C-alpha cells in the first residue's frame, strides 16, 4: 500500500462531504498526489483536509507545467521523515517552508525487538513497572488487547466508537478543558472516515477491553510502513493502571510483529511522547506561490507571517489560555463536570456488615465514579476480580460504602476535605 491515506479518494470524499459541502476539489498538473480546495475570493488553494491531516506528501512534476501561475498553494503537515525530494527551481514557482511543530517517532526498524527497544529507552525499574501494570490489570479484569485493522463489522465498530466518544467526553469533563474532537461535526466525520479506512487497511483502531468494555482506544492512520497516531484516550477510572503507557507498549509490540518501521506519536509537547520516542522530526507547512505575480507574492508573504505568528503565540501557551477562557465563557453544550472525590478504602475483618441491612448499589453507575475509582486503585495493590465486587450503601450514613469481593470485604469512606 503506497498511497498516503490523506490523498486517498476515501479521505477526499469524506472530508469534502463534511467540511466542503461537496464543492469542487482541484488538482494541478505541476504537483502530484495533492488535492486542494479554493479560497472563496482569492487565488489561494489549501490541501484537502486542512488541519485534519497527519502527514502529507507530494511530488513536483518533472514536466514544465504552468498551471501554478498567479496562484498560491498551502500544504499543511509535512513531516521531515517523509523524505520528500529537495525542491528544485521550477520556473517562477517558489517554495517557503514554515516550521510549525516538533513531532516524535520510534524508528522501529532500528531495533531487533520490543525488548531491545525498551532496554534502550528505560531503566530496569521502569520496564518492571510497565510489565507490572499489565499483570495487575489482567489479575483484576478479563483483558483483551485488539488491533482492528483491515476488518471490522459495522455493528462492532459503532459500539466501540460510541465508547470512544464517551471516554473523550468523560476525560475532558474531568479536566474541564475544551476538546475539539467532541464537536458533533468533527466526530461525525471521524466516525464515517474511520470505519471506511479501517476496512481499507489505511487506518486502525487499537482497543483495550476490560470485561469486554473498551477502556482505552487509539485511532491511527497507516501509510506504507508507518503507523501514525491520531486520537487516543483512556478511561480515567483506570488511572492507577497507566492504560496510556500500556496502550503504547502493546501497539509497539504489534508494530514489531507486523513490519511497521516508523511509529509516529505525531506533534505535541507531551511528556509521554518524549519518554517513548527514539527520535524527533519537524513538521512544516509548504507554501508554493508564483513569484512573478505581485498578488500571489503578497498573499504568500501574509500567510507566512500569519502562521509564524500563530506558532509564536502557541509556543508561549497563549493559545491554551485563550481556548480555556473561550470554553469557560462561551462554550456551549459543555458536559457536566466530572469531579473525582477522594475516598479511603480499607479491608475489614471484624464487625462485618450484613448485606440485608444495607442498600444494594450499581458500581457501574456514573453516580459512584469516585467510589469505583477508589476501589480500582485498591485492587491494583490487592488484586482480585473486579466483576465479583458488589457495592452496598448504608441506610443512614452518607459517603460510606461497603464492597463485597471474592477475597475481601471493603469499607469505603469519603476523606474529609
Image: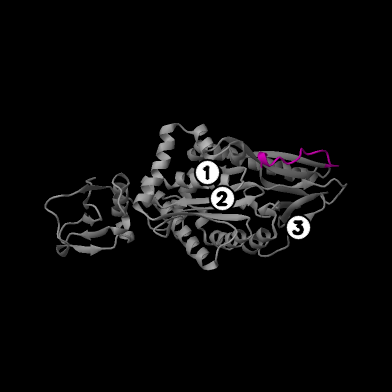
Give the SS element for disc 2.
strand
Q: Is residue 13 left or right of residue 148?
A: right
The circle drawn on residue 230 is 2
Residue at 69% over, 53% down: 1
In the image, is residue 87 part of the stretch drawn in magenta?
yes
Residue denoted by label 1: 319
Label 2 crowd (10 A; few <14 / some 14-19 / many >=20): some
Colour mode?
one colour
Q: Earlier in the sequence, mark 3 or mark 2?
A: 3
Q: Which residues are magenta?
A: 79-92
Distance (Cα) linking label 3 and label 2: 26 Å
Q: Residues within 10 Å of mark 1 (few under 14, many from 20)?
A: some
Of circles 3 and 1, the one toward us is: 3
What residue would you read off at disc 3? 26
Residue 250 seen from this side: yes
- Residue situated in front as seen by the camera: 113 or 177: 113
* Comparing labels 3 and 2, the label whose residue is closer to the camera: 2
> Would you say the magenta stretch is mainly helix, strand or loop?
loop
At mark 1, the secondary structure is: helix
Within 10 Å of the Cα at label 3, are there few (<14), some (14-19), or many (20+) other Cα atoms? Answer: some
Reading the chain from its start, which is encountered first: label 3 or label 1?
A: 3
The numbered disc on residue 32 is none
Residue lying at the far left in this picture: please name it.
Answer: 351
179, 387: nearer the viewer: 387
Residue 142, x across and y down, in percent: 39, 56
The spot of residue 187 in percent (x, y) is 53, 60
Q: Is residue 316 visible?
A: no
Determine the CA span between mark 2 and mark 1. Answer: 21 Å
Q: Find out whether the residues at labels 3 and 2 contact each other: C-beta distance under 8 Å.
A: no
Q: How many marks?
A: 3
| Residue 395 relative to residue 329: left or right | left
x, y (%) of residue 141? 36, 54
Amino acid at each position: 500500500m503506497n498511497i498516503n491515506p490523506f490523498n486517498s479518494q476515501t479521505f477526499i470524499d469524506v472530508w469534502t462531504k463534511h467540511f466542503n459541502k461537496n464543492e469542487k476539489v482541484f488538482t494541478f498538473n505541476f504537483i502530484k498526489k495533492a488535492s486542494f480546495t479554493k479560497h472563496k475570493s482569492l487565488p489561494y488553494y489549501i490541501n484537502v483536509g486542512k488541519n485534519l491531516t497527519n502527514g502529507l506528501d507530494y511530488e513536483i512534476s518533472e514536466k514544465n507545467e504552468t498551471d501554478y501561475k498567479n496562484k498560491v498553494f498551502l500544504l499543511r503537515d509535512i513531516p521531515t521523515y517523509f523524505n520528500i525530494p529537495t525542491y528544485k527551481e521550477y520556473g517562477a514557482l517558489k517554495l517557503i517552508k514554515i516550521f510549525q511543530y516538533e513531532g516524535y517517532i520510534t524508528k522501529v526498524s532500528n531495533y531487533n525487538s520490543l525488548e531491545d527497544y525498551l532496554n534502550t529507552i528505560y531503566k530496569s525499574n521502569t520496564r518492571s513497572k510497565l510489565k507490572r501494570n499489565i499483570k495487575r490489570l489482567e489479575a483484576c479484569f478479563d483483558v483483551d488487547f485488539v488491533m482492528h485493522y483491515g476488518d471490522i463489522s459495522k455493528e462492532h465498530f459503532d459500539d466501540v466508537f460510541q465508547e470512544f466518544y464517551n471516554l473523550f467526553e468523560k476525560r475532558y469533563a474531568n479536566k474541564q478543558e475544551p476538546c475539539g474532537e467532541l464537536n458533533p461535526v468533527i466526530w461525525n466525520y471521524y466516525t464515517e472516515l474511520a470505519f471506511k479506512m479501517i476496512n481499507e487497511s489505511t487506518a486502525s483502531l487499537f482497543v483495550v477491553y476490560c470485561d469486554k468494555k473498551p477502556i482505552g482506544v487509539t485511532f491511527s492512520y497507516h501509510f506504507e510502513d508507518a503507523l501514525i497516531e491520531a486520537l487516543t484516550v483512556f478511561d480515567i477510572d483506570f488511572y492507577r493502571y497507566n492504560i496510556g503507557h500500556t496502550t503504547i507498549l502493546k501497539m509497539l509490540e504489534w508494530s514489531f510483529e507486523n513490519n511497521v518501521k516508523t511509529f509516529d506519536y505525531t506533534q505535541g509537547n507531551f511528556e509521554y511522547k518524549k519518554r517513548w520516542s527514539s527520535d524527533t522530526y519537524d513538521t512544516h507547512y509548504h507554501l508554493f506561490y508564483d513569484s512573478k505575480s505581485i498578488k500571489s507574492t503578497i498573499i504568500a508573504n501574509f500567510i507566512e507571517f500569519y502562521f509564524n505568528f500563530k506558532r509564536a503565540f502557541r509556543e508561549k501557551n497563549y493559545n491554551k489560555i485563550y481556548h480555556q477562557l473561550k470554553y469557560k465563557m462561551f462554550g456551549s453544550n459543555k458536559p457536566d463536570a466530572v469531579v473525582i472525590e477522594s475516598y479511603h478504602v480499607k479491608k475489614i475483618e471484624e464487625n462485618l456488615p450484613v448485606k440485608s441491612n444495607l442498600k444494594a448499589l450499581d458500581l457501574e453507575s456514573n453516580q459512584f465514579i469516585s467510589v469505583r475509582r477508589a476501589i480500582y486503585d485498591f485492587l491494583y495493590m490487592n488484586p482480585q476480580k473486579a466483576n465479583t465486587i458488589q457495592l452496598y450503601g448504608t441506610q443512614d450514613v452518607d459517603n460510606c460504602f461497603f464492597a463485597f469481593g471474592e477475597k475481601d470485604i471493603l469499607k469505603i469512606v469519603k476523606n474529609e476535605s
